[in-house]
Amino acid sequence: MASILSSRGKSAKKDNSPPGESAPRPKLHFGLLGAARIAPNALLRPIQGYDEAVLTAVGARAPQRATAFAKKWDIPKVYSGEGAYQDVINDEEVDAVYIPLPNGLHYEWTMKAIAAGKHVLCEKPISNTEEEARKMFAFAQEKGVVLMECWQPQFHPALHRVKAIIDEGSLGRIVKVSAQFGIWRMFLSDDDIRFDYNLGGGTLMDLGPYPINVIRYLTSSVPVVESAKAICRRENIDRRIEAHLSLPNEGSATIMIDSALDGWGPFKLIPQLPKLTARVECEHGSIEIFNYVVPSLFNRITITKDGKSRSERVYKTKEGKGETPWWSAYRYQLEAFVDKVHGREPQNWRTAEDSIESMHIIDAIYTKCGLPLRPTSEYTPDLA
């Protein structure tokens, strides 16, 4: 979903990739499974100018689409047809695969890639259920490969700054947290693949990881879902969800997601601005970040204490990393992944527990809403 917001800011900032480093290092060769819309922002642009990674192959089932995509992005190897994804995985030159496929295919193709000894960077949500996520990470550990779920805001300095202010303690104990992610109803059609139940669709699966993860990250805790209610597009497919959670320190948290906000005006045709705010209320003040979803496009952090407010915008790390103001959060994420594969300690990391606990909350919210969990994959991996 962040790809929709990112693409709307792309015209003003066409290249958010930094220049390459001068000292060459061994490149990690990536293979891409599927010519997905999110791939350019999530991998293709961030990898440009990065001396430690290169996109070597792409696989898409439609031959014409695969060829056109490879030509546009100058990808040396292209595979197409029913066996395209497996062909990318089998390519001996490929070290790691990026999986931006529909949610319901994450488990199957991640397990197949791990079985082939490939490192995996998989789009969020990591799987359809908590049970699948546990199996995926256990298999990756067994095979000695790196598996990471993409959630790019966690790697951006803006979110690090918010967390640092909270952890510093001057605002006091966290009392209440709220996070929302809502978009205008005209952004997505009702037949969008994001709303296909059999492929793990639903607004909670698409937008939900953002508020869930930002609350977990900023509070350094695992909230418990107390209640939730949903408005559905159709049977089993949620459009809007509001959830109330409790925090371990007796604080509370609320989540709101909506993939079809009404517009303004008499016919509701004037677009409503996306709801992209996370707010943490503490004993002695509060801190709020606008656009925690795609902070590299624009962000604003507002800190209020003793009745006085100040604002910050953060795009660079303390070390000055991020030579241009619009260094993409996806680039920080990519570098962390490559660091981990090469045995270096990343500045930030999304752990297996982060992903598993996120899926646990998603499962719990669906259950509280009286909706079924997304379907478990029919794929049975050979774990021998």
Image (cartoon, helix red, strand yellow):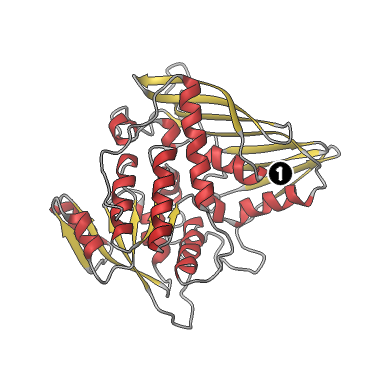
Q: Which residue is mark 1?
A: 302
Residue at the farthest top position: 266
* Residue 80 location (% of width, % of height): 15, 56
* Residue 17 location (% of width, % of height): 45, 64
Whether residue 68 is visible to the viewer of this picture, yes or no, is no
* Residue 230 location (% of width, % of height): 47, 20
Residue pictured at 25% horizontal, 66% vertical: 75
Looking at this view, is 206 or 326 the one in front?
Answer: 206
Residue at the farthest right position: 306
Q: Quadrant of the C terminus?
A: bottom left
Whether residue 201 is visible to the viewer of this picture, yes or no, is yes
* Residue 240 location (% of width, % of height): 47, 24
Residue at the farthest bottom position: 23
Identity of the amino acid at label 1? Thr
Residue pictured at 71% horizontal, 44% vertical: 302
Q: Quadrant of the N terminus?
A: top left
Quarter of the image where one finds residue 287: top right
Looking at this view, is 259 or 99 the one in front?
Answer: 99
Residue pictured at 22% horizontal, 63% vertical: 90
Looking at this view, is 203 or 37 the one in front?
Answer: 203
- Residue 341 versus residue 310 in the image, above or below: below
Residue pictured at 49% horizontal, 66% vertical: 340
Q: Secondary structure at mark 1?
A: strand
In the image, is 33 to the left or to the right of 362? left
Quarter of the image where one finds residue 173: top right
Figure label count: 1
Quarter of the image where one finds residue 282: top right
In the image, is 350 to the left or to the right of 96? right
- Residue 59 versus residue 224 in the image, above or below: below
